[in-house]
Every structure is written in C-alpha cells, then in structure tokens.
Amino acid sequence: MSTLANVIRRAYELLVTGANLLQSPLLLALRIYFFWQLFLTGKAKLSNIGKVIDFFTSLGVPAPSLNAYMG
C-alpha cells in the first residue's frame, strides 16, 4: 500500500515540477497572442477610421470623430 502511495506522490511531484517549468513560457505565449490580436484590431480601426466614425454617428455617439480616435 505504501508503494502505491509513493508512486502517486512521485507522479504528483513530477506534475508540479513540469507545470512550474512551463508556466513562464505559457504566459509569454498568451501575452504575445493577445498583443497581436489587439494590434491587428487597432490597425484595422485606424486604417478604416471613416467607417468607425460613420458607425459611431449612426449610434448617436457625441463627437463621433473624437471618440473614434480616442476609443
């Protein structure tokens, strides 16, 4: 019985060690992915700013041109 407990304990320790080693690269990959998505969205917005201004105007947003550039 103690052998099974030792095997389970060792497997858990290996899992925790592996997870700790992969934590930083995983977080870096997530940050790069979300940065790229936000960058593409902002780039598309600025390259088609006229459409954004028209959309804000149709919604009744006050000062749509200013809000399009600021938001």
Image: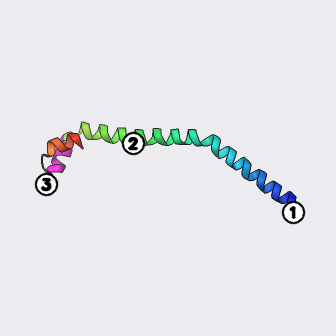
Residue with the mark numbered 2: 37
Magenta range: 50-61
Q: Is residue 63 left or right of residue 21?
A: left
> Residue 23 is drawn in which quadrant?
top right
Q: Nearer the viewer, residue 5 or 32?
A: 5
Q: Is residue 10 left or right of residue 47?
A: right
Residue pushed farthest bottom? 1
Question: Residue 53 location in percent, x, y?
Answer: 17, 45
Q: CA distance from mark 1 to mark 3?
A: 72 Å
Residue displayed at 21% across by 39% down: 69
Residue with the mark numbered 1: 1
Q: CA distance from mark 2 to mark 3?
A: 28 Å
> Residue 59 is drawn in which quadrant?
bottom left
Residue displayed at 41% across by 38% down: 36
Asked if marks 1 and 3 touch (Cβ < 8 Å), the reply is no
Residue with the mark numbered 3: 60
Asked if marks 2 and 3 touch (Cβ < 8 Å), the reply is no
Question: Residue 13 location in percent, x, y?
Answer: 73, 49
